[in-house]
Image (spheres, grey):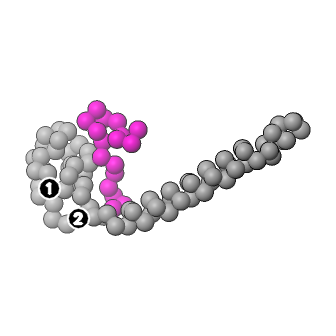
Amino acid sequence: MKGFRTFLMQGNILDLAVAVVIGVAFNAIVQALASRNRAATDRQCPECLSTIPIAARRCMYCTAVVPQATAPVPPEVRKPRRARHGFLASE
């Protein structure tokens, strides 16, 4: 156990851990600032509940005719748009 503790305290691993923590914190700040400036561009299909563009007249997944959007959907309700294969685009 003493040898492992010495290995961790050599500096390289500790520096890497600090850099990862700082990077995660910086990413969280940037994402929070970027999410405030986005306008609502997506909404949910009333039939299949998929995320579709706000100007869509038909759902691209179930092809249901959707009514025109009157008011933008709040950003808290929006979900990430799914790719055509059904998985999240970020995966």
Residue 22 point in image, percent of width and height:
60, 57
Q: Residue furthest top?
A: 85
Mark 1 to mark 2: distance in Å? 11 Å
- Residue 87 vs residue 10, the one in the foreground: 10
Would residue 85 be counted in the magenta stretch?
A: yes
Q: Which image quarter holds the C terminus?
A: top left
Work out which quarter of the rendered image holds the N terminus and state it: top right
Q: Secondary structure at mark 1?
A: loop
Picture residue at 10% right of the left edge, 50% below the top: 57
Question: Is disc 1 surrounded by few (<14), some (14 to 19) or many (20+) residues within 10 Å?
Answer: few
Callout 2 amino acid = Pro
Question: Is residue 71 located in the magenta-colored stretch of the structure?
Answer: no
Q: Quadrant of residue 43?
A: bottom left
Taking 7 as reference, is 26 above or below it? Answer: below
Q: Is residue 17 left or right of residue 36?
A: right
The dominant secondary structure in magenta is loop
Between disc 1 and disc 2, whose residue precedes? 1
Image quadrant of residue 60? top left
Magenta-drawn segment: 75-91
Amino acid type at circle 1 is: Ala
Residue 83 shown left or right of residue 60 in the figure: right
Count of numbered labels shown in the rendering: 2
Label 2 neighbour load within 10 Å: few <14, some 14-19, many 20+: few
- Residue at mark 2: 72
List the single residue furthest toward the right. Answer: 2
Q: Which residue is labeled 1 in the image?
A: 55
Tag 2 secondary structure: loop
- The x, y position of residue 6, in whole percent, is 85, 41
